[in-house]
Amino acid sequence: MATIITKELALRIAKKLDARIETRSNKPHDIACIYHAGNLVAHFGIRRGSDKSLGHDHVPKDIFVRMSQARLLGQCPMSKQEWLDEMQRQGRL
């Protein structure tokens, strides 16, 4: 199965959602933590390796959206507010 969420797209998603990137020494992943009103809403790992084609297909599950919504977040059609609205509909905020 082809990788759908690449490292580059995962980084764009983290940036769009204003995630705080927590670097953990001696670990292969950084953690993108997404906060709203001071509360942690979601988090996901981002591999530190230089291979940008490595899969990050776990991101949609970790931020509670479908694969297509995660791609829209990374590619710009979906805004942070639309993601927050989805989290509100799911009762996560």
Image (spheres, rainbow, N blue to C red):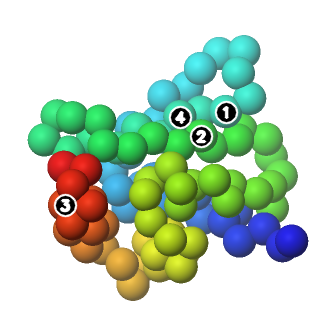
Any mark on residue 29, and which?
1
Distance Cα–Cα, label 3 vs label 2: 23 Å
Distance Cα–Cα, label 4 vs label 1: 6 Å
Q: Are marks 4 and 1 in contact (CB under 8 Å)?
A: yes
Q: Residues within 10 Å of mark 1 (few under 14, many from 20)?
A: some
**Residue hosting label 3:** 88
Determine whether, in the image, residue 43 is placed left or right of residue 48: left
Lower position in the chain sequence, tag 1 or tag 2: 1
Lower position in the chain sequence, tag 3 or tag 1: 1
Any mark on residue 66, and which?
none
- Above-or-below relation of 70 to 77: above
Indicate the secondary structure of the residue bearing disc 1.
strand
**Residue 35 drawn at (x, y percent):** 27, 41
The amino acid sitting under disc 1 is: His
Indicate the secondary structure of the residue bearing disc 4.
strand
Q: Residue furthest left?
A: 37
Q: Are marks 1 and 2 in contact (CB under 8 Å)?
A: yes
The amino acid sitting under disc 3 is: Gln
Q: Are marks 2 and 4 in contact (CB under 8 Å)?
A: yes
The amino acid sitting under disc 4 is: Ile
Q: Which of the 4 quarters of the picture holds residue 80? A: bottom left
Q: Residues within 10 Å of mark 2 (few under 14, many from 20)?
A: some
**Residue 67 drawn at (x, y percent):** 57, 72
Indicate the secondary structure of the residue bearing disc 2.
strand
Q: Which of the 4 quarters of the picture holds residue 11? A: bottom right
Name the quadrant of the N terminus. bottom right
**Residue hosting label 4:** 31
**Residue hosting label 2:** 45
The amino acid sitting under disc 2 is: Gly
**Residue 5 drawn at (x, y percent):** 66, 65
- Above-or-below relation of 53 to 41: below
| Residue that appears at 35% across and 56% down | 17
